[in-house]
């Protein structure tokens, strides 16, 4: 790194000023979202035509059926994880991923799950929300001794109640959960509850502290999380959810963030809360909402039937949870007079300019000189301009032909249905007087 680069990096990281070479976003193609790993057919996995749960950017734990017992194997291990193109980190997870594979069973199943510990310290697995014999609950020290490094323990229990649950480490929780040791645990009912759904998704919310340029998330962080994720992916690394207009869609949200709840908001529709980790809500208790608060340590299940096709935003509504790494720890510059600073800086760096004095809306699309292995302030490329949100953000793609739609393609809007510049004649006719332009 030469002196000029050093000044640029340190200015940004230390927050002395916001610096950019002014290059429009077109010069640097934003990575396309990951293709959606939808099964080609929606497979039936439980009685009454209940379909398999899809875990965007994730997978499902395979079972071996041995004398009627569903046998699975989780390997707790370090994972070289990609949050989004351009940002990788050394996380911990199960079977090569964080979150680990989604466990999917049917009410009444007898499960035998082996857990092999390939971490550099002991671990356990807690089956969060499942009612089972106490000795299978996975709490280190309280209900079992921790699984030593290199050993395999066996958990065995019957899933007596259906619902949307989770699993996670219960040894050195602060470290192991913060580094990604979590997964969804779904038990389909023997007798379907409510109307059949056409799509069923599982999304886990999480928050991480990954210092800019670092490779290891910091599990000691208590407040200032700078990588926010759905299924451990940050937009534009999140796979979109492709659904059909008029289909009934279920999304199972689980939150094992170290510290925060997440109000998850979906545009273009209203949904109803149909279940929590404690059970199903009766029809009269199913609250219609557009935002559902998912507390840490809980799950929330929502269902909806989208009536408007389009590309709809789905995101945490905490504004700092739709930012990425470089959006944290920067100084407020709005309204600052940086005239003198700019002149002085230009003597040593001719391309220098201060940013952010009129707001920060343009920051994402500027080509900031960011350190290797980091995400820019926010967002990714959209069909009209830069999408100003990143982090815990994904896109619900409502299509008339969801099974053949290109998950990376954008919605084609019918003519005349996009907001655009107002026609002065129309404004005049409507009695809208534009304010006099200030110079
Ligand atoms: Cu959030």
Image (cartoon, rainbow, N blue to C red):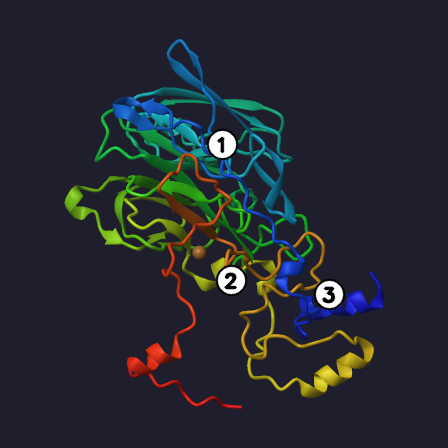
The quadrant of the rendered image in which ligand 1 is seen is: bottom left
Disc 3 crowd rating (10 Å Cα; few below 14, some 14-19, many 20+) is some
Are the residues tagged 3 and 1 within 8 Å (C-beta)?
A: no
Nearer mark to the viewer, of 2 and 1: 2
Q: Position of residue 269 (x, y in %)?
A: 30, 52
> 123 or 78, which lies in front?
78
Q: Position of residue 45 (x, y in %)?
A: 35, 23
Going from N to C along the chain, the mark reached first, 2 or 1, is 1
Residue at 75 percent of width and 85 percent of height: 343
Residue at 51 percent of width and 46 percent of height: 238
What secondary structure is marked by label 1? loop
Residue at 64 percent of width and 45 percent of height: 89
Q: Is residue 234 visible?
A: yes
> 180 or 11, which lies in front?
11
Are the residues tagged 3 and 2 within 8 Å (C-beta)?
A: no
- Where is mark 3, residue-wise? 9
Left or right, 222 with reference to 89:
left
Left or right, 41 with reference to 306:
right
- Where is mark 2, residue-wise? 388
Going from N to C along the chain, the mark reached first, 3 or 2, is 3
């Amino acid at each position: 790194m030469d002196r000029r680069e050093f000044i640029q990096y340190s200015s940004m990281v230390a927050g002395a000023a916001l610096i950019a070479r002014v290059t429009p976003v077109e010069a640097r193609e934003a990575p396309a979202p990951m293709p959606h790993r939808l099964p080609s057919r929606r497979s039936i996995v439980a009685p009454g035509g209940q379909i398999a749960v899809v875990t965007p950017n994730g997978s499902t734990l395979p079972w071996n059926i041995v004398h009627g017992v569903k046998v699975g194997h989780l390997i707790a291990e370090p994972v070289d994880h990609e949050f989004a193109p351009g940002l990788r980190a050394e996380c911990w997870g199960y079977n090569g991923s964080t979150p680990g594979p989604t466990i999917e069973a049917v009410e009444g199943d007898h499960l035998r799950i082996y857990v092999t510990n390939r971490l550099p310290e002991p671990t356990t697995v807690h089956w969060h929300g499942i009612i089972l014999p106490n000795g299978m609950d996975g709490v280190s020290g309280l209900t079992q001794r921790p699984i030593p490094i290199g050993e395999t323990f066996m958990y065995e229990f019957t899933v007596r109640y259906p619902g949307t649950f989770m699993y996670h480490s219960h040894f050195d929780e602060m470290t192991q959960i913060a580094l990604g040791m979590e997964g969804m645990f779904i038990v389909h009912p023997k007798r379907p509850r409510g109307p059949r759904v056409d799509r069923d998704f599982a999304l886990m919310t999480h928050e991480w502290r990954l210092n800019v340029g670092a490779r290891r998330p910091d599990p000691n962080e208590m407040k200032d999380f700078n990588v926010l994720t759905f299924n451990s992916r940050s937009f534009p690394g999140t796979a979109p959810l492709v659904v059909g207009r008029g289909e009934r869609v279920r999304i199972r949200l689980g939150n094992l963030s170290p510290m925060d709840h997440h109000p998850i908001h979906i545009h273009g529709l209203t949904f109803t809360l149909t279940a929590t980790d404690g059970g199903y809500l009766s029809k009269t208790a199913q609250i219609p909402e557009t935002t559902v608060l998912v507390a840490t340590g809980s799950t929330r299940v929502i269902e909806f039937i989208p009536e408007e096709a389009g590309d709809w935003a789905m995101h945490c509504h905490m504004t700092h949870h739709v930012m990425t790494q470089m959006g944290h720890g920067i100084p407020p510059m709005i309204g600052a007079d940086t005239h003198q600073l700019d002149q002085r800086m230009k003597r040593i760096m001719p391309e220098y300019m201060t940013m952010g004095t009129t707001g920060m809306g343009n920051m994402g699309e500027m080509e900031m000189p960011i350190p290797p292995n980091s995400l820019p302030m926010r967002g990714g490329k959209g069909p009209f301009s830069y999408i100003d949100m990143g982090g815990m953000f994904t896109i619900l793609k409502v299509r008339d032909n969801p099974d053949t739609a290109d998950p990376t393609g954008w919605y084609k809007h019918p003519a005349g249905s996009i907001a655009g510049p107002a026609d002065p004649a129309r404004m005049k006719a409507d009695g809208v007087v534009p304010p006099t332009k200030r110079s």
